[in-house]
Image: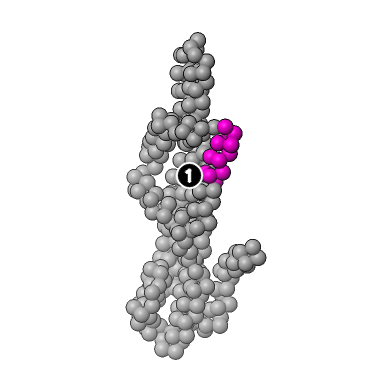
Amino acid sequence: MDIVALISLVMAFAMIIVAYIKEGGSLGALWQYTAAMIVFGGTFGAVGISFPFASIKKVPKAIGKAFGNKKIDRLEIMNTFMALSTIARKDGLLALEHELEAREMDDFIVTGLRLVIDGADEEVVRQILETRIINLEHDNEKVIAIFEGAGGFSPTMGVLGTVMGLVSVLGSLGGDVGELGHKIGVAFIATLYGVGFANLIYLPIGTKLKELNSDDVMAKNMMLEGIQLLRGGSNPAFMKEQLKGYLEDEEEGQSEEGER
């Protein structure tokens, strides 16, 4: 679990609610089930119309990924390829067959190594693995688009709910002023739901998934480079120098966290 992301989400909602109460608002007034029906029902309906079910059914897994703490360790990838390079130079590429069973490796690496062990042409190996990277990126982008779409539909549904509420209010003009004020307040709750969930849930998750997608693609390109270097018989020292470039942004991030 990504504790920072969870704490940030809870803090954002907590600060908004506490500030609302400090301004004299009532906590109970924030819950209006009819506004929730319009905003959430309308948003989910619009998403269902806009995107195929094959992409929508991946949303729960994407949410788990966004709030998970599973990050691809590129340093570990580099060390793995250095170790495989040592074995390949000592015992030949066929010796890597045993490593496929003995080591726990990413499926992408396993696929690439099997192609290399089977003697596939360099261009064939690259083409197959690059196609897998393109498909991975494309699948991730389709799920990201769902959250970005929800972030666009949600505020619009909030405005729709508010307009519907105001239509009811206008029909009650001439009645009790206090009751009229209450109805106006209820009408604007729909806009609160729409804007709030768009900017605190849907769009932030979409942004987080974009970042994770970038990391995934970077790691897969690193694996592809390592596989091609293995096939070419690179020694561990050269392998390290070639793959170190994929660690620069990761090392910068770790350095910034250490400074904090």
The residue that appears at 47% across and 69% down in the rendered structure is: 224
Q: Is residue 119 something one can see in this rendering?
A: no
Of the pair 188 and 122, the residue shown nearer to us: 188
Q: Is residue 73 something one can see in this rendering?
A: yes
Q: Magenta span covers which residues? A: 12-24
The residue that appears at 59% across and 67% down in the rendered structure is: 254
Quarter of the figure with residue 96: bottom left
Is 194 situated above or below 78? above
Residue 81: % across, % down = 47, 77
Is 4 situated above or below 108? above
What's the residue type where badge 1 is placed?
Tyr
The residue that appears at 46% across and 54% down in the rendered structure is: 66
Mark 1, other Cα within 10 Å: few <14 / some 14–19 / many ≥20: many
Quarter of the figure with residue 100: bottom left
Residue 61: % across, % down = 38, 54
In the displayed image of the protein, which residue is found farthest to the right?
Answer: 259
| Main SS of residues in magenta | helix
Residue 248: % across, % down = 60, 68
Is residue 234 found inside the magenta-colored segment of the image? no
Judge left or right: residue 26 versus residue 120: right
The residue that appears at 65% across and 65% down in the rendered structure is: 259
Residue 2: % across, % down = 48, 58
Q: Quadrant of the C terminus?
A: bottom right
**Mark 1 highlights which residue?**
202
Of the pair 161 and 43, the residue shown nearer to us: 161
Of the pair 33 and 110, the residue shown nearer to us: 33
Q: Quadrant of the N terminus?
A: bottom left
Q: Secondary structure at mark 1?
A: helix
In the displayed image of the protein, which residue is found farthest to the top?
Answer: 174
Numbered label tally:
1
